[in-house]
Amino acid sequence: MSSPVHYALEGNIGVITVDNPPVNALSQPVREGLFDAIAEAEGDASKAVLIICEGRTFIAGADITEFGKPPAEPWLPAVFDRIEALDKPVVAAIHGTALGGGFETTLAAHYRCAVPTAKVGLPEVKLGLLPGAGGTQRLPRLGGVEAALELMTSGSPIPVSRALELGLVDQIIEGDLREGALAWAEELVAKHAPVLRISEQAVPEHDAAVFDRLRGMAAKRARGQIAPQSIIDCVEAATQMPFIEGSRVEREKFMQLMQGPQSAAMRHLFFAERQAAKIDDLPKDTVKRSVESVGIIGSGTMGGGIAMSFANAGIPVTLIEINDEALQRGLSIVDRNYAGSVKRGKLSEGRAEKCRALISGSTDYDSLADVDLVIEAVFEDPDLKKTIFARLDNVCKPGAILATNTSYQDVDEIAAATERPQDVIGLHFFSPANIMKLLEVVRADKTANDVLATCMALARKISKVPVMSGVCYGFIGNRMLQPYFREAQLCVIEGATPEQVDNAMESWGMAMGPLRVADLAGIDVGYKARQALPEEQRGDPRSYRVADVLAEMGRLGQKTGAGFYRYDPDTRKHANDPLVLEVIEREAAAFGIERREIPDEEIVDRLVYGLVNEGMRIVEEGIAQRPGDIDVVYAFGYGFPVWRGGPMHYADSVGIKRVYERVCEFRDRFGAEAWTPAPLLVQLATE
Ligand code: T1G
């Protein structure tokens, strides 16, 4: 087996080339290859050394697939110390993304150059880790404490133009990187450039108060996560102790995180996200249709956000509305959203204008005659949707993909409203659609393979995380949400307050508690969905009676200033409302419920195990391809804490047997209708 690292002398320069596709991860053979190459350079005639990579990117980090396995030598810090110790200039030449251990490789080098399109970053925090190969000690020395903390606690890569400003990169190479980097290395040799070892540099002046300030911000921004706090501790150590000792602190905290459940959960999501993009029974060579233009029916909140997602990816969009007034209203929402993105510094003025220019409006369906994809995003009226699809069937060109953004409706029925059901698919975006990453791609019975393959790839093009779902009421996410909300409202009528339920779930890690989510989404959404169902299909009336009463009182949530909470008209801050407690007590009495103290642990278990049990059914029915897909749906679409890995991973981390026993206990206490353990849960727990 040849080494993925190649060493050769080119003129005065010893060139180390890493070639480990797909992303030149620092696997054991790569570490060994680097170690041996430096050993060779130590003893040969080279005057300087160049580290460069083949393929689409510079080293994108340690090999995450090796984590959790017995570690193999050489260790990364040892490799980097040997690179840094070399007594001739070492230059790192960056293209693509130098991330994590990849960026740390460049920090062990003495000089860094890059092509203009390259990015550098330390995303370890997104894996529940910290830069464990010298990054927390070298980066503050090179770029300063503030920049180092921002890069490591955000985990977001930066363009090399910004890295140049921060002094993290020394030279931008226009044209061919290898040629330019070799020439630059020769130049450094010619002018006897010194060997600049970052570990020997002092940490620049900084405001020591930054550490506690950032600990507070990280506790809010990454509630429940340990890694950001550990990163801050390591950088603080870098300012207080020599490199060797600071590296010891880094190593210790890295190993704690590596062996902890949070990183295991976030690494699970890293691979689950990439797995979710793959359709097991779809031939790999399925030819995709081209999507160069898109039409969207309905310019409401969803339609406008979906339009921005495509325009932001450079795909022109035509927004269709029933009349001019509605169209102008829709387009002004888009304008406001772009202005907001510019104000928050998310987009530059120029870029926002360029994207906005790709969105046009019309009230004439004929303007969709040549588009490649149409997405219907009107309100949840099944008959209206079928009418629209029948109309699209007449207007759109052969081969156009017809998609519905429904959150619940039967996509097979919608497809049956056309003569081309093979071209129909569900594309379920999440609000706000220009922000939320998740996209449920709903495969209907007759959806053609090339339509499915096209939409899965298109999702990544518009920076969404695609997950395929089969057709059922509410698909993956919203179907699982039913037992979650059922239990939330049952806990309220049985004795908890809305605030207790929300605080219990938020302390456990949910981005927002269920009753606050209901107020944000609008209590009328659930109310209308229930009204559309025959009474016997609405479930246990105790689980929605309070919500129905609030809706009939006009308390629809934030949009009416009151729902389960009341909201300050200026700050939108929520507050408990004694009126709601009165409604709860009155309805509980009407059901003959004696309200009781409910421990937070019971609230969490009922809501989360409700998700898990339904998730098991969704896997066994094949609505989701694999449990990991469900975890991706909940982490990217429903504010499930990434450091718990998603409902299904969480069930594994708690222990399937424990989940099963608790579900059986709930069945015995609250009834089999809500709590019959899913066959897959029974099987996994008993076998
Ligand atoms: N290790 C192993 N496999 C990796 C990998 C990695 N670091 N990065 C990507 N892959 C696989 C991925 O699973 C997929 O496999 C294929 O490569 C293409 O990836 C000590 C501890 C680089 C921006 O967190 O962010 O260094 O599905 O589909 O969209 O301090 O991959 O084809 O079988 O994502 O073009 C820190 C992780 C590690 C970067 C490319 N580094 N990677 O995105 O392709 S921790 C990261 C990415 C660390 C040190 C610490 C992205 C990418 P498959 P892809 P892409």
Image (tube, rainbow, N blue to C red):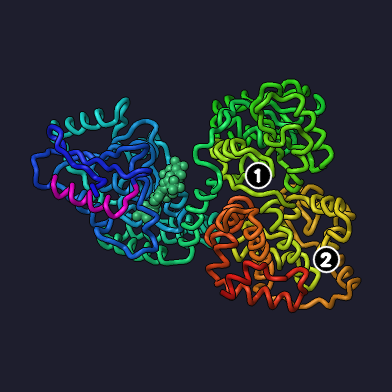
Q: Is residue 544 magenta?
A: no
Q: Where is residue 120 drawn, in percent x and y?
A: 38, 42
Q: Nearer the viewer, residue 280 or 430?
A: 280
Q: Does ligand 1 reach within 8 Å of label 2's beta carbon?
A: no
Q: Main secondary structure of the magenta part?
A: helix
What residue do we see at 62% from left, 69% from top?
A: 681
- Residue closest to the eye, 640 or 218: 640
- In the rendering, at what x and y percent does residue 402 appear? 69, 33
Q: Which residues are magenta?
A: 25-41
Residue lying at 76% horizontally and 46% vertically, measured from the top left: 409
Q: Position of residue 108 (x, y in %)?
A: 26, 48
Q: Is mark 1 within 8 Å of ligand 1?
A: no
Sort mark 2 into few (<14), some (14-19) or many (20+) by Cα contacts within 10 Å.
Answer: some
Q: Does residue 537 sit above or below 321 in this rendering?
A: below
Indicate the amino acid at tag 1.
Arg
User: Residue 443: which disc?
Assistant: 1
